[in-house]
Amino acid sequence: MTETNKRFPEGFLWGGATAANQMEGGFHEGNKGLNIADVLPGGKERLKVLSEPGFNFEIDHSKYTYPNHEGIDFYHRYKEDIALFAEMGFKAFRLSIAWTRIFPNGDELEPNEEGLAFYDRVFDELHKYNIEPVVTISHYEMPLNLVKEYGGWRSREVVTFFERYVNAIFNRYKDKVKYWMTFNEINSGLMMPIMGLGFSIQKEEDKYQPTFQAFHHQFVASSIAVKACHEIIPDAKIGCMIIFAPVYAFDSNPENQLYALQEERLFNYFCADVQVRGEYSPFIKRYFEQHNIDLKIEEGDLELLKENTVDYIGFSYYMSRTEKKHKTDEDKAHGNILSGIKNPFLNASDWGWEIDPAGLRVSLNKLYDRYGVPLFVVENGLGAYDKIEEDGSIQDDNRIDYLREHIAAMRDAINEDGVEMMGYTSWGCIDLVSASTGEMSKRYGYIYVDKHDDGSGTLDRKKKKSFFWYKDVIATNGENL
Ligand code: BG6
């Protein structure tokens, strides 16, 4: 490999990614209201809650623990954490704003000053070290009041509340934040409506109409945010954020090829088509007809979507997905959160997520070919158990290998395939609460946090081996992997 094709572009945004509900804690402080993440139980129970119909959105301390309430206490320790990110040389730090810090119930007329002031302090601290904040406006943390009183994103009224929220944060942070994203992993609402769309499906067969109506409201809300962002902060960039997992056909059987294509169009492209191209695709319109979905689209909605498309695509990449039309239970890759069947060529993580660095290069190519807008990998990483050695160190070579191979895949997509990329913020740069299982033991960080699944621990921070490795990657702009 020559020196030139080892390079990442100048100004590439290296960093790490997090979400408010998984790390801040302080769930009752600063007048913050309750959000969805605050009522999600910890441990494997959570996945059950997320994937089965009928969740009631109540806290029940007699049955469950609630790890997000304390998170990793970033709310009080942000200065220490940001100093560690700076020591690694971060150029960017992805975080989300908790909507309920700004509008505790979601439907107030005026924002909560204490919440606004908290993020002022965080952004100022980041700028002290020349770290660009990359802000997700809504990351699985819808105000609980909007869920209970309005039915989450099923309600059109929520669009108005969201508009108030984005106007408040764009006006307040216009000089501090230049990179924004609207809804985290918006397409995840297809499989986990609780976190993404703010409601629980009551009966499997009734899911289509409310799900896609809620998506329509989110698309309208997203376009309103894009429009407001462009008006209030003309030098900012605002993106969408999707989960992308390329779908491979299990074999060359044309039936399986077609099935993989259809799954890909629905899960991977449906949302980005609307947010990047500004319209519902012919495929999805047919899908609506086939499932008797009759979207209520208000006058002006379609023009709004068309005229206010995003500037870039942010996406998370953890795994690929392999599919065949007729699969048995035995074929299934059970750990993979995105279902699919086992891929005989891939190994899986401690949590059964299949590891596929080449799949990241495939994803970058597919997205760039289809949309031609800059791409930002805003999540990627290995959730794994960490072991503290006798000398106190954490030798997370498995994490380093994982990251090295994925970063090499991006480098090749840029240099060999001509893909345009803005940056890379690996997920959970500091250990935090897992979104799907509420566990602390599923660790992604370069920085270890002494907190355990049972809630015990000092919350002390400790640098892992990967901390020093990533620091060198950033210092050499990706040349030393
Ligand atoms: C993404 C989410 O799905 O994956 C994050 O945007 C999440 O919030 C991350 O934490 C990893 O998933 P998990 O379940 O291992 O935390």
Image (cartoon, rainbow, N blue to C red):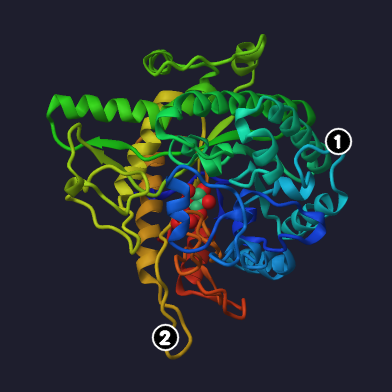
Disc 1 target residue: 109
Instruction: Look at label 1 and name its amino acid.
Output: Leu
Helix, strand or loop at mark 1: loop
Question: Where does the image place residue 104, in percent across and percent down from the top left?
Answer: 77, 47
Disc 2 target residue: 389
Which residue appears at 81% of the width and 58% of the height?
Answer: 30
Q: Is 173 drawn above or below residue 119 in the view shown?
A: above
CB of mark 1 near ligand 1 (< 8 Å): no
The circle on residue 312 is: none
Q: Nearer the viewer, residue 429 or 368?
A: 429
Q: Quadrant of residue 250?
A: top left
Q: Quadrant of residue 389?
A: bottom left
Q: Nearer the viewer, residue 406 or 262?
A: 262
Which residue appears at 82% of the width and 55% of the height?
Answer: 31
Left or right: residue 161 compared with residue 69: right
Task: Let me know if residue 416 appears in the view.
Answer: no
Question: Where does the image place residue 421, in percent across and percent down from the top left?
Answer: 49, 39
Left or right: residue 77 compared with residue 315: right
